Image: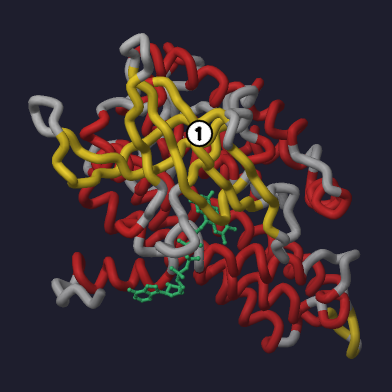
Amino acid sequence: MTQIAFTESEERQELRQAVARLASKYGREWFTEKARSGGKTTDLWLEIGKNGYLGINIPEEYGGGGGGIGDIAAVCEELSAQGCPLLLMVVSPAICGTIISRYGTEQQKQRWLPGICDGTGTMAFAITEPDAGTNTHNITTTARRDTLPNGESEWVLNGRKVYISGVDEADHVLVVARAEALSDDGGRTGQVKPVLFVVPTDAPGFEAQPIPMEIVSPEQQFTVFLDDVRLPADAVVGDEDGGLVQLFAGLNPERIMAASFSTGLARFALDRAASYAKERTVFHAPIGSHQAIAHPLAQSHIEIELARLMTQKAAALYDAGDDLAAGEAANMAKYAAAEAACDAADRAVQTHGGNGITQEYGMAGLLVATRAGRIAPVSREMILNFIAMHSLGLPKSY
Ligand SMILES: Cc1cc2nc3c(=O)[nH]c(=O)nc-3n(C[C@H](O)[C@H](O)[C@H](O)COP(=O)(O)OP(=O)(O)OC[C@H]3O[C@@H](n4cnc5c(N)ncnc54)[C@H](O)[C@@H]3O)c2cc1C
């Protein structure tokens, strides 16, 4: 069969169908029940792990599927589209899995990646801090070297992180901290650099407090306190001097995954709205026969498909190794997907009338869930800054 450039491969389409079938066994009602009762999505997480979908982007020799970001983004989107969005997919396999696969030592890959793939060793990611916010150059979590009496070296971490997703479900957190750069002869320089550390969530001095959020999701956000957390030398991911490059390696996957998370949620909202509009009759005919209802939903369908197309383009560029072009596309995809999702959720609520605000129909909860996509993992304003600077050549504004 002729492969047209902008269609996904048959294999990818089959992957989508298989994930959708699996997630539909759980469904939205299961997901919201878990969220409201303080339950977790562990069963679904482990089942997608067992089926090889969770680590589909990770090399086969470490328990993964040997696929690309396009594959794991498809998994993420289909879960969302069934009403079961799993934010930790963005974090554990896509950000942490990518960084460790690309830059971890052989020993680190063997140690962390199989658990990330089968879901038994989930890893959260912590960069955001209360005072630094979007300006991650200003993070103040510090990593200090300490030489033990036996001559071995340890790291001591101190600081605070906010909005860290899934700390309660993770065994480890990939933490971005600042360490003093050493000169070639090991002397002090006074300059700091970002370094990535794998921190066990049960380490002494590690504490996490849940942040009450308005999102209806079993996955929670936490404030993390690091108080003299001691780590062995090999807790540093890859090369101590390559922190920034290694961090950047996680950014495009993060954005592509966030876009997929949003387009999936948008598809879910639109699907529910279209079904409702076909059934609900008020004045003699289904409300979907009124253009005031039909046109906004049609508009959402167009916006979602455009965002999906850009997400697939970003993933294809990333998987082809074109990091620069992938960066622009991933930012645009993430922007377009968040906008499409917010509008689709709003229109879905409006289509449902009063039912749109009830817990029974569960539409209003989507307003906050989709709205978070405009803020995290990178805000729409920072994407517009990026596009203004890098695509349009305008001066840096901050
Ligand atoms: C649901 C959720 C999950 C999250 N999970 C994680 C996680 O797992 N790990 C993690 O590390 N972080 C996580 N975050 C944090 C997230 O990445 C940040 O919230 C986000 O980067 C914005 O930072 P901030 O909240 O500090 O906003 P601020 O930096 O305080 O920004 C506030 C507003 O000002 C705007 N602004 C700031 N600077 C500029 C500028 N120069 N130009 C224009 N506008 C500007 C921003 O766009 C934003 O609208 C999560 C957040 C949410 C909501």
Residue 44 visible to an observer of this rendering: yes
Badge 1 density bin: few <14, some 14–19, many ≥20, Cα 10 Å: some
Please, is residue 363 above or below residue 103 in the view?
Answer: below
Residue 56 in the image: x percent, y percent?
50, 27
Q: Which residue is mark 1?
A: 229
Residue 383 place in picture, x, y as percent:
35, 67
Tell me the quarter of the picture where residue 297 sits. Answer: bottom right
Total marks placed = 1
- State whether residue 64 appears in this view: no
Spot the residue most to the left.
184
Q: Is residue 206 above or below residue 262?
A: above
Which residue is most to the front? 149
- In the image, 316: left or right of 256? left
Q: Residue at x 48, y 45 (%)?
A: 126
> Could you say which is closer to the camera, residue 63 or residue 287?
63
Q: Camera-side residue: 142 or 127?
A: 142
Mark 1: is the Cβ under 8 angstroms from ligand 1? no
What residue lies at 25% left-to-right and 74% top-to-bottom?
398
Colouring rule applied to residues = secondary structure
Amino acid type, callout 1: Val
Q: Find numbered disc 1 in the image and state the secondary structure of the residue it sits on.
A: strand
156 shown above or below 223: above
Q: Quadrant of the N terminus?
A: top left
Expressed as whole percent of the image width and height from the top left, the position of residue 356 reads 81, 75
Residue plotted at (21% across, 49% down):
324
> Would you place residue 337 above or below residue 5 in this image?
below
Q: Closest to the observer: 199 or 108? A: 199
Q: Is residue 146 left or right of residue 43?
A: left
Residue drawn 14% across and 72% down? 393
